[in-house]
Image (spheres, rainbow, N blue to C red):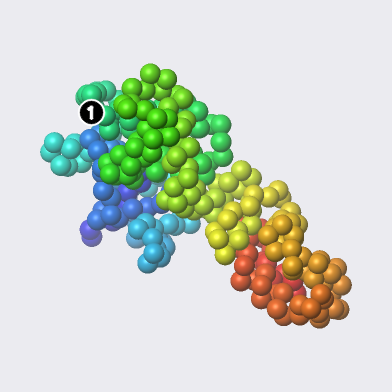
C-alpha cells in the first residue's frame, strides 16, 4: 500500500510535537522559495483523519500522536539540483535552527539571502519565547512561505520608511524590528496569526472571534460571555443596552426597540467562542 505523507514547514516543529499542532501541506502544495529551505515529511497512517477546506492550501487534524510516534524525515532543499534531500542527522533540532546551518548553506552576498537571515534571526532572538505561540508560529510560517517578490516589496517599503539608498544591516536588530513592523501590517501575516489564535495558541488559549472582521479577542477562563458583552459595548453600542437588559431579564422579549430573536440572531451570526465548553447559544437561550 502506498504511503501517505504530509509536510510541515513551521520553524518550531520538532519530533516531540503533536501532529494536531501544525498545518499539514500536501506534496503538490509545498513550494520552497530559497536554497536551504527545510521541511518535515511526516508519515500519515490510514487511521489519521485529515480535514481540508476548499479555501485552504493545507489540512489539519485532531490526531494527537507525536511526530516521533508517526515517523518523519527532515528535508533540506537544494536549489541548484531542484530537489529535496533527507538529512535525518538533524532529528531533535528545530527547523529554524537547521536552516541557518552553514554546513549546508553557503553564506553569500546575495541581498535576499542575507535579508532572510536577518529577519529570521530577529524572530529567534526577540520574538520566540517572548510572545504567545500564535505570533511565533505565524512569524516562522510567514518566512517559510515568503516568495522573493514579496520580500523585495517589504525591503522597498523599509528603505522608503527609513529614507535609505541601500541596506547595510549595520544595526541588524533595529532594522529587523522595523521590517517586522511592516510585515505585521500585511493581511497575509494577520491571517496566519488569526488562524493560530483560532486554534488555541493565543495569549490565553481562549477567546472570542468577531466573524464580521475576523478579529480575535483574548479572554480569561470562564470570561467568554463577559468578553462578548464588552465587544458589543465597544463596537456595537446601539445594541449593548438591549443585550444587557434581556440577558438579566429572561422574560423580556424586546428591549430598546430590539426583539430577542433579532438579538439572538445577531449574537449567533457575529461571534464564535474559542476554548469554551459551553456553546454560544447556551448563553442566550
- Quarter occupied by the C terminus: bottom right
Can residue 238 be seen at all in this image of the molecule?
A: yes
The one nearer the camera, 116 or 74, is 116
Where 276 sits versus 178, above or below? below
Residue at 34% over, 37% down = 156
Q: Position of residue 38 (x, y in %)?
A: 30, 38
The one nearer the camera, 65 or 168, is 168
Q: Which residue is mark 1?
A: 110
Where 239 sits versus 146, above or below? below
Q: Position of residue 241 (x, y in %)?
A: 81, 67
Furthest residue in direction top, as rendered: 170
Residue 75 placement, left or right of 23 = left
Residue at 12% over, 38% down = 81
Residue 260 placement, left or right of 112 = right
Residue at 42% over, 63% down = 51
Q: Position of residue 173 (x, y in %)?
A: 45, 24
Residue 33 is drawn in which quadrant? top left
Can residue 90 be seen at all in this image of the molecule?
A: no
Q: Position of residue 178 (x, y in %)?
A: 46, 32
The local secondary structure at tag 1 comes to: loop
The one nearer the camera, 236 or 246, is 236
The one nearer the camera, 100 or 263, is 263
- Quarter occupied by the N terminus: bottom left
Q: Badge 1: few (under 14), some or many (20 or more) residues near its Cα, within 10 Å?
A: few
Residue 134 placement, left or right of 272 = left
Amino acid at each position: 500500500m502506498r504511503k501517505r505523507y504530509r509536510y510541515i514547514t513551521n520553524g518550531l516543529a520538532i519530533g516531540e510535537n503533536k501532529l494536531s499542532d501544525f498545518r499539514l501541506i500536501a506534496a503538490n502544495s509545498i513550494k520552497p522559495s530559497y536554497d536551504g529551505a527545510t521541511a518535515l515529511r511526516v508519515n500519515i497512517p490510514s487511521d489519521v483523519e485529515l480535514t481540508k477546506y476548499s479555501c485552504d492550501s493545507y489540512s489539519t487534524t485532531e490526531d494527537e500522536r507525536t511526530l516521533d510516534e508517526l515517523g518523519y524525515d527532515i528535508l533540506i532543499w537544494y536549489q541548484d539540483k531542484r530537489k529535496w534531500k533527507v538529512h535525518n542527522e538533524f532529528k531533535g533540532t528545530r527547523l529554524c535552527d537547521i536552516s541557518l546551518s552553514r554546513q549546508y548553506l553557503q553564506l553569500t552576498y546575495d541581498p535576499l539571502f542575507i535579508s532572510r537571515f536577518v529577519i529570521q534571526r530577529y524572530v529567534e532572538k526577540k520574538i520566540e519565547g517572548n510572545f504567545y505561540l500564535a505570533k511565533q508560529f505565524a512569524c516562522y510560517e510567514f518566512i517559510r512561505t515568503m516568495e522573493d517578490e514579496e520580500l523585495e516589496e517589504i525591503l522597498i517599503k523599509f528603505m522608503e520608511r527609513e529614507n535609505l539608498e541601500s541596506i547595510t544591516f549595520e544595526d541588524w536588530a533595529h532594522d529587523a524590528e522595523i521590517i517586522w513592523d511592516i510585515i505585521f501590517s500585511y493581511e497575509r501575516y494577520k491571517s496566519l496569526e488569526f488562524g493560530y489564535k483560532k486554534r488555541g495558541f493565543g495569549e490565553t488559549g481562549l477567546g472570542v472571534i468577531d466573524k464580521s472582521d475576523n478579529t480575535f479577542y483574548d479572554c480569561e477562563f470562564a470570561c467568554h460571555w463577559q468578553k462578548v458583552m464588552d465587544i458589543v459595548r465597544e463596537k456595537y453600542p446601539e445594541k449593548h443596552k438591549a443585550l444587557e437588559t434581556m440577558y438579566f431579564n429572561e422574560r423580556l422579549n424586546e428591549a430598546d426597540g430590539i426583539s430577542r430573536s433579532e438579538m439572538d440572531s445577531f449574537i449567533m451570526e457575529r461571534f464564535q467562542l474559542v476554548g469554551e465548553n459551553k456553546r454560544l447559544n447556551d448563553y442566550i437561550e
